[in-house]
Image (cartoon, helix red, strand yellow):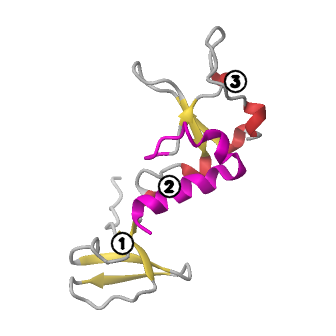
Amino acid sequence: MTNQEAKQDAIKKAYGDKWELVKDHARDFDGSVLTFPFLMDEGHEDDGFFYNQLGFNRNELNTYIGGDMEPSRWRPLILDDIEDNNGWIRIEPDGSNLPKSGEYRWLFESGSMSNFYYEPGDIMSTKLTHYKPMKPELKPIY
């Protein structure tokens, strides 16, 4: 499964049994959908969705207001930060996106994590699924 396919799968799982109602309206890159009528100002026409139909609780959704050229949108909270996968980079099946030399945090299939230095050409475990760069700790300002 490619990274894009994995992302689409995560979006679909976030909506669960409600996916069929929103699939034609959810954006591929972040899973957001146009705002429901319950969040719209009076006088605006709804887009055919009703909050009651989907059965989300308000505390399960993240809503955000669009700019002048984009209407308000919403998505399940579990999709927050899907744009960068919480900083994790999913390793492509062929390993084509392994990082350059450096210190990284690695995620194994088991869910355990480990920090170690990687050098291109190192033999990598097939049990690794994701990595993210280690960021140096910043010293206090005061």
Q: Nearer the viewer, residue 83 or 133?
A: 83
Residue designated by label 3: 38
Part of the protein shown in magenta: 1-30
Tag nearer the camera, 3 or 2: 2
Q: Quadrant of the N terminus?
A: bottom left
Residue designated by label 2: 8
Quarter of the image holding residue 131? bottom left
Crowd rating for badge 3 (residues with CA inside 10 Å; few <14, some 14–19, many 20+): few
The percent coordinates of residue 53 (x first, y second) are 76, 35
Residue designated by label 1: 92
What's the residue at 34%, 70% (across, down)?
134
What's the residue at 47%, 52% (across, down)?
82
Going from N to C along the chain, the mark reached first, 3 or 2, is: 2
115 shown above or below 48: below
Question: Marks 2 and 1, how far apart in space?
Answer: 15 Å
What's the residue at 25%, 77% (across, down)?
102
* Label 1 secondary element: loop
Q: Is residue 24 magenta?
A: yes
The percent coordinates of residue 104 (x first, y second) are 34, 75
98 shown above or below 58: below
Q: Main secondary structure of the magenta part?
A: helix
